[in-house]
Image (cartoon, coloured by chain):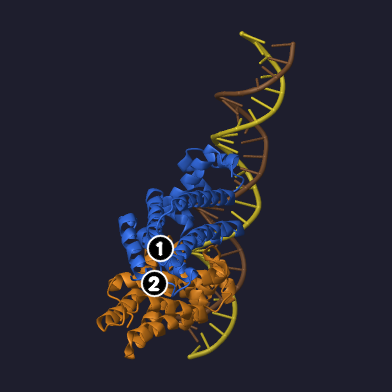
Chain colours: A orange, B blue, C yellow, D brown
Amino acid sequence: MEIKERQLEIITAAGEILTEHGLAQLTTKRLASKMGFSESALYRHFSSKEEILVTMLQYLASDMDNRLKQSLQHVEAPDLHLKTVLGNQFDFFKRNPHFLVAIFSEGLMEDSEIVKESILQIMHIKKFHLHKIIKKGQADGTFTKELTADELVHIIMGSFRLHLLQWWFSGQSFDVKQKGEKLINNLLTLIKLKK
Amino acid sequence: MEIKERQLEIITAAGEILTEHGLAQLTTKRLASKMGFSESALYRHFSSKEEILVTMLQYLASDMDNRLKQSLQHVEAPDLHLKTVLGNQFDFFKRNPHFLVAIFSEGLMEDSEIVKESILQIMHIKKFHLHKIIKKGQADGTFTKELTADELVHIIMGSFRLHLLQWWFSGQSFDVKQKGEKLINNLLTLIKLKK
DNA sequence: GGCATGTTTGTGAATATTCACTACCTTCAT
DNA sequence: ATGAAGGTAGTGAATATTCACAAACATGCC
């Protein structure tokens, strides 16, 4: 994906609007105003509003994929690994709250099929990486095998999402990383085999 | 809450539009057309579109509260109780999928403060009832005390929501009740004390 | 019984506003 | 002098809401 600098500025601004004011407020007028130029100037960099959204989501997906891949390189015990990966995610959203939209963007999906695909893609990437870790942990006896890896991933992702959702609802009023680490520990308590 | 018959028809129609076509398609035009009368007739029954949404959400909240309260009357073992309550919820959404909107309505919340309050209210009701059951189960030794009741509720609700979300994304293509019961069993496996 | 009055529930047209998008013009650096 | 990046000033379509008005029905009075 080749993405120009001005385009990156625009999709970042779009993400900020989404986070601060919601989907209904993400208009070409508001976006242009935030960028400091006119509406028509937007169309110098993107051919449509849909393309702006899709580019934003694809950028996020590839960025997330990279970060997750990177964290898979270190060979760690699966439980520590899970901590690291989920912790990184919380960290990322803490620093880039405007990308929360990709997690809670059900409204976005109505707009177009391509946008919907992009969002499902992001969910799939995260699922895929978690699955790998869980599988490894089950193989080496760290995690329980009473549930399948898929089932464990579902429970982890569900809790993870709800945590971010509550943070969002609260207006990002608490430390999502810190409370998130507590959540991870709780999940580990439940899924780790007792020795 | 006194709610007239025609109003109930309208909020049901609104819920169906939301589920089938999404928030962006819930317009006065479409709603009136679905009801078989003109747009202006809507305003005979509600003073605004916002009032339609709020009424719909409050109706759902009180309905859900009643069903949950009722299920609390039977004295059951906490694990069976949890099965019953969550199973009932899956059943309800299977029969009334148009009310899924209240669960995944982040987009709705942008519209108005009152709508947002109504949605949070629904989440709170469910949380409250689950909390009661978990607490009881911890007291009588059914559930683990390694986590607090709040923490367990969070994990249960998160998994629950994600399950419904995936059902929604899939276009309600699988049996949400059946797969949901599998999920409940998985959760119970994790949180029940081993004897 | 007949009639006046008021209510309910609808219609169709009109309103102001917002939306994404575009045709056309300007500026300016290479 | 060309092309990228911007501005001006519009477009048509869609939006929620309001308006004056009417058909159907109920109520109570004579």
- Give how far across and how far down residue A98 sits, in percent: 51, 75
The numbered disc on residue B160 is 1
Q: Position of residue A151 (x, y in %)?
A: 31, 69
Q: Amino acid at mark 2?
A: Met
The N terminus of chain A is located in which quarter? bottom left
Q: Is residue B6 above or below residue B154?
A: above
- Nearer to us in this view, B121 or B142: B142
Q: Circle 2 is placed at which residue position?
A: A157
Residue A162, can we see it? yes
Tag 1, which secondary structure?
helix
The residue drawn where x is 47% and y is 79% is A182
Badge 2: chain ID = A
Label 1 amino acid? Phe
Q: Is residue C26 left or right of residue B193?
A: right
Task: Give the SS element for disc 2.
Answer: helix
Q: Nearer the viewer, residue B65 or B6?
A: B65
